[in-house]
Amino acid sequence: MKQLLVLILLTLITHTSLYAQSEATLRRTIDQLEASIEKEEKELSKLKQSKASKQKLVNSLARQIEKRNALIAARDKQIKQLGKDIQTAESRVGELSENLSALERSCAEMTREAYRNYRQNNTLTYLFSSSSTLEFVHRIAALRVATQHREKQIAQLYNTRADVQAEREKLTAKREEVAVAKRKLDRQRTKMREERDLAKATIRQMSKKEKRVQQSMDEHIKRLDTAIAELRKLTKGNRSGDSFSSTTRSLQLPVTGGRVVRYNANTAEIVGTKGANVNTIYEGKVMKISRNKINNKYDVYIAHGEYISSYANLSAVSVNKGDKVLRNQKIGTIASMVNPSTMEVEYKILFAIHSPSPKVVIKASNLFK
């Protein structure tokens, strides 16, 4: 039984520690995003005042909208955590208040009983009515025990009152924290709508050339091609997942519940829902995991024999470099991205398949038939 109690205590301590770490991590994320947004706001202000190209302004607005969207998600999560804290605090205050009421009733009854006994049979009468010395000593000991019990009850009463007050103050602070977080959340949503409207208006004024430059996915493709050129050297002779070939067809989309919105040769732009899983299309080996320094999103590269599949724009990754993965195994979670045409936040990845030779192009549109 003792071992069980120790185990339960350790579990509670560990859970509390992990929750505290999670809360601290979330607060750091919020602080970093707010600092980054503040920095971007200064850059935006300079761009608006200068004669910089509309394309630069839209790019900056897109980055800012993406950051605000991440901050809104973090604030939402924080408010949910605080809501759970408030429920716990309310429950604690309720329990302590019940204990306090019971103690107050007990102490009141004890006081009334002591007063009645004093009126009817005072302490000296109680002691000197003893029939023997031994009984006299026993009665003194009994009075001491009764006194200690009363003192303990009174101390417990005062301590419980202090605990109730402390918990109520914590509860008030948590409620105020939620109110502040909600106000900040509303401000971020308002600013994001304003920036989206400004970006849309700017896009309407952009020339055709600027609009072509604006296509962020095309820019990402160029970065992926550079990484693939280096990976081809590493995958030469690779035997993990070597049953994959250019004739493999009817594979599942790498996004759970996703749909393709655009094909471009060996790439597919796939949209999904928030939190959707990103899965490997075939068995293979994780060759590389990189992180985009601009948007803080992940790109994963998997070798299937000498073929390589790439998955760009993941918010989280659940595999490590060197891991062997199975077909349709989860490798991460889809991330958000601002649509450069509508400036709306979407959840999407850029998937691509690469043959061992850069001269041979496998059409992504043929893979998922």
Image (tube, rainbow, N blue to C red):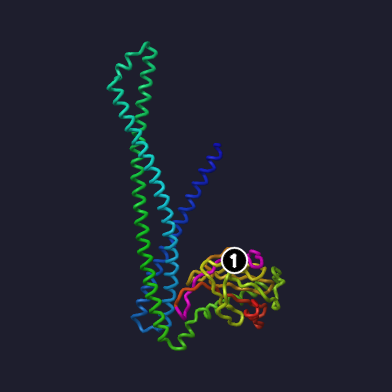
Q: How far across and how far down the image is residue 329, in percent?
A: 63, 65
- Residue reaching furthest bottom? 208
**Closest to the observer: 230 or 76?**
76
Identify the image quadrant of residue 284. Answer: bottom right
Q: Mark 1: which secondary structure? A: strand
Residue 285 in the image: state x and y as whole percent: 65, 67
Q: Quadrant of the N terminus?
A: top right
Q: Quadrant of the C terminus?
A: bottom right
Look at label 1 and name its amino acid: Ile
On screen, residue 328 above or below 248: above
CA neighbours of label 1 inside 10 A, class few (<14), some (14 to 19), many (20+):
many
Q: Is residue 36 above or below residue 159?
A: below
Image location of residue 306, percent across then percent down: 68, 74
Q: Which residues are magenta?
A: 319-342
Residue designated by label 1: 331
Residue 328 covered by magenta stretch:
yes
81 left or right of 113 in image: right
Outermost top residue: 132
Q: Does residue 143 sit above or below 267 in this rendering?
A: above
The image quarter in which residue 65 lies: bottom left
Q: Nearer the viewer, residue 2 or 92?
A: 92
Q: Position of residue 197 (x, y in %)?
A: 39, 78
Q: Is residue 302 left or right of residue 199?
A: right
Q: Is residue 53 left or right of residue 318?
A: left
Q: What residue sits 37% from the left and 58% below the top?
A: 178
Q: Is residue 174 left or right of residue 291?
A: left
Q: Nearer the viewer, residue 121 or 318?
A: 121
Instruction: Indicate whether residue 312 is drawn in magenta.
Output: no
Residue at the image point whose x is 34% and y is 49% from the top = 169
Quadrant of the image occupied by residue 36:
bottom left
Note whether 5 is above or below 323 in the view shown. Answer: above
- Residue at left 48%, top 84%? 213
